[in-house]
Image (cartoon, grey):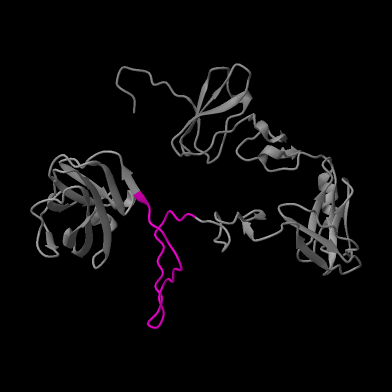
Amino acid sequence: MSQAGYTPISLYYSTTASAVPSSGNLVAGELALNTLDEKLYFKNSAGTVKLLASNAGSSATVSSVAVSGGTTGLTTSGGPITTSGTITLAGTLAIANGGTGQTTASAAFNALSPITTTGDLILGNGTNSATRLAIGANGYVLTSNGTTASWSAGGTVTAVSVASANGFAGTSSGGATPALTLSTSITGVLKGNGTALSAATAGTDYVAPGTATTFTATQTFSGSSSTFGTSLLDSNETVNVVGSAPSATTNLYVQSGSVQYYTSNAANNFVVNLAFSSGTSMNTALSTNQSVTAALVTTQSSTAYYATSVQVDGTTTGVTTKWIGGAPTAGNASGLDVYRFAVIKTASATYTVLASLTQFK
């Protein structure tokens, strides 16, 4: 019911379900309403009636839709789409999108279908065709000439050669089942480095009875309950000859020589310090329940001097010294005084030192 005093404006409308105005029902820009469908239409300047709004959520009638195949290599056809329709894709699917990129491969693959043998292979020639390659029987090998491939019966070995390298050499008997005989060109004791063989060096790589060998690591000869660990016919010890007199604290390094000989006349009393070397303590070098012996030779003039005490590793702490006949109180003039020490390690940094002083003249 219109407002009193006003004239109502009525649009072209329909109350019939699914009714759509035709182009002849409207002029350009005119609106039309389907009150039952709740849809609003208008006619554009090209004379086409289009759905402008819909309260029912229905799809509009579309005259055309642009669809692109993008980088797939495919093209589209079909349409225009109205309320329903079909867009068709056709062409060659690019390799980058999972295709073959070939225009004739489809026919080639169709010719191969169906592949009924489990394990068959599809062989492409790199251009635009493919063939089916059946797996060969046991003992067959796959061969290719660069264009096609096929299975052929396995061959036999008729000759094998052995290269002389890395200390190895060898020969082959030849024939269908050749036997290899390996040898080496190296004479003597062999050593390997994980890749090649070479001749070992006596005294460096192994101990040879007739070759002088210097050991830089501790060697342990244990023997048994019935035999000695070592048996020496003759041996010698290195003497550390010092062309001076004993200093106030005289270091006796057993690693420099178990015998240390001072050739100049003693000029003062001195303390004897027993150690393994200038850089390694006796406590480090000697294990508990091991011992080492050393001798200190001093030259005496008419005025003699003597050792007043004994240290191990620069201290008397933990050191118990026992002298034959008691500790010396004086030196012996005009001769050589020889001090002998047996250092017994009883615990860490704990020693019993057996000492003696003997005059030689």
181 lies left or right of 261 = right
Q: Is residue 226 magenta?
A: yes
Furthest residue toward bottom: 226
| 277 versus 326 height, above or below | above
Q: Position of residue 47 (x, y in %)?
A: 63, 20
Total marks shown come to 0
Q: Position of residue 336 (x, y in %)?
A: 23, 51
Q: Which residues are magenta?
A: 214-239
93 lies left or right of 175 = left
Nearer-the-camera pick, 133 or 129: 133
Q: Is residue 58 magenta?
A: no
Residue 169 occupies which quadrant of the picture?
A: bottom right
Res 277 seen here:
no
Q: Position of residue 337 (x, y in %)?
A: 21, 52
At 38% from the left edge and 56% from the top edge, which residue is drawn?
A: 237
At 72% from the left edge and 34% from the top edge, which residue is drawn?
A: 73
| 73 versus 115 height, above or below | above
Q: Position of residue 282 (x, y in %)?
A: 24, 54
Image quadrant where one finds the N terminus: top left
Nearer-the-camera pick, 159 or 270: 270
Residue 218 occupies which quadrant of the picture?
A: bottom left
Furthest residue toward left: 329
175 lies left or right of 348 = right
Res 168 seen here:
yes
At 80% from the left edge and 66% from the top edge, which residue is drawn?
A: 181
- Give the main secondary structure of the magenta stretch: loop
